[in-house]
Image (spheres, coloured by chain):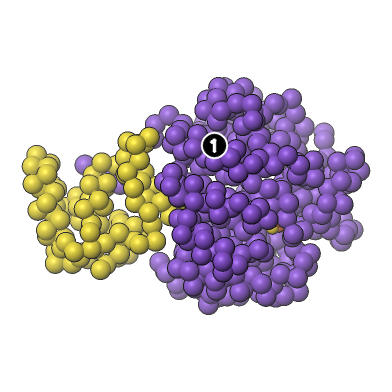
Chain colours: A yellow, B purple
Amino acid sequence: MSDKIRSEEVFRRNPHFRFQWEEAQGCYVLLFPEGMVKLNGGAGEVLSRLDGNKTVAALVEELKAAFPDAPDLESDVLAMLELGLEKIWIVRN
Amino acid sequence: MLNNGVAAQSTPKPLWLLAEVTYRCPLHCAFCYNPTDYVSHTQNELTTDEWIRSLREARKMGALQLGISGGEPLLRDDIEEIVAEAGSLGYYSNLITSGVGLTEKRIAEFKRGGLDHIQLSMHDITKEINNFITDTNTFELKKKVAAMIKDYGYPMVLNVVIHRYNIEHIGEILEMAEALGAEYVELANTQYYGWSLINRAQLMPTREQLEKAEAVTNKFRERVGNKMRVFFVVPDYYSDRPKKCMNGWGEVFMIVTANGTVLPCHSARVLPNMTFPNVREHGLEWAWTESPAFNKYRGDSWMKEPCRTCPEKEKDLGGCRCQAFLLTGDAESADPVCSLSPNHDVILQAIEDAKNPQIASQPIVFRTDKNSHKLVEGERERVEQFHALP
Ligand code: SF4
Ligand code: SF4
């Protein structure tokens, strides 16, 4: 559905959605009209780092530094971004 | 690490709090989901302080989404205070309104207080049907309010209750929503509770109308793509499995009503032999976790056959308890929408009745104080006729 994500692109969270840490759930959540998503650890890490300035390449580097032991991190991040685009959790800057 | 991006489920927590702050309403919708005896619940509304306390308690329990609805919530003059409290507590808050009573001054105050979105009800592209079904002259006003919502930078969420009188206009309704700049449109086929149950034969569309409406909706979705999200809430009478009502009794939804009764769903008060907790007597924590009412239909241990041994029971949890009671007289039976229910014929009969010109041409009973008083006083012949207890 969405076209391919390139490493020099910059994404930000959909400004119409609210993204926050929820102590009671122990996870990040995305809130929007008609629904909410509880994000798992990985998705939360990705979304919390999208500041509207960082390229995808820089985001991957940052995550690699934070999680040096995670295998296949790059492809996971790309898959996450694709999903986020499709669900309009994130938008191209 | 990422699988589908969604965290695993844990034990039930009330994620959604619906505050039905008043049952007063200037509209008289034929499909209104408020209780038919709402006039008995319009006195003793919770005070601002009682609402604020309830918001705090629910937030502490993990509630995140807040709907402020009614009746028409804007008939209360403390919605600004409630909104501001919700904002500071970190709720994602939604005002569910007919638009009557929304002024520039109030919307600016809501924006300042942190209200996240406004859900406006619309009824049709024609003034005639809008005014007929709501029994008010509100067509022009709703358009003005829609523009105001947009001007204040809110995501525009339109809710359109679908019934026989507007179902054939779905294409034009969607185009109107697009022209108004809506981001979300909920096409909510009428569910038959409260006033809409009384008016069921007059409101229910035919299967052909429904199929056409779905096809038109899908075509529209393809054209607009991600720009607009269109939800099509299917009418359960035309399916052969029930909906997982409220996503499970006491699983995610908690409703606090105008006078403080705490309910697991809008219509739970119709169930017999139940005592629902009230925020004036108990905290919300007790109401949700301890009260007998919230535990009664939690999970599946209350089930009878055919649900008890049904391989699909996790999917729908036996459907809606209120619908089971209203249509079969037994709250613990399978929702009769299910084709495996021994009472499924009451649904088929309802569909037949809606096609019967003699029944379907009876006058609509609009949601008015006068009609509500009559229903309280026991003039229930028509209701009983439809409940058709076996
Ligand atoms: S459905 Fe209509 S009458 Fe009922 S509360 Fe909503 S606006 Fe008022
Ligand atoms: S028999 Fe009960 S549990 Fe099985 S599908 Fe029907 S309503 Fe659901």
Question: Left or right of B234: which side holds B385?
Answer: right
B191 and A67: which is toward the camera: A67
Q: Which residue is mark 1?
A: B53
User: Is residue B117 at all visible to an observer of this figure?
Assistant: no
B277, above or below B164, in the image: above
Look at 87% across and 59% down and name the residue there: B363
Instruction: Name which quarter of the figure residue B259 lies in.
Output: top right
- Location of residue A5 in the rendering, given as x and y in whole percent from the top left corner: 20, 64
Quarter of the image that includes the C terminus of chain B: top right
Residue at the outermost bottom position: B179
Look at 60% across and 26% down and name the residue there: B282
- Location of residue A74 in the rendering, given as x and y in whole percent from the top left corner: 14, 52
In this figure, what is the number of numbered marks? 1
User: Is residue B87 at all visible to an observer of this figure?
Assistant: yes
Quarter of the image that includes the N terminus of chain B: top left
B114, above or below B3, in the image: below
Question: Left or right of B310: which side holds B6?
Answer: left
Q: Secondary structure at mark 1?
A: helix
Chain where mark 1 sits: B
- Location of residue B152 in the rendering, given as x and y in whole percent from the top left corner: 48, 69
Question: Left or right of B359: which side holds B50?
Answer: left
A38 and B50: which is toward the camera: B50
Look at 77% across and 58% down and name the residue there: B28
Instruction: Name which quarter of the figure residue A18 lies in.
Output: bottom left
Give the amino acid at mark 1. Answer: Arg
The local crowd at label 1, few if under 14, some if 14 to 19, many if 20 or more residues have their Cα within 10 Å, is some
B44, above or below B276, in the image: below
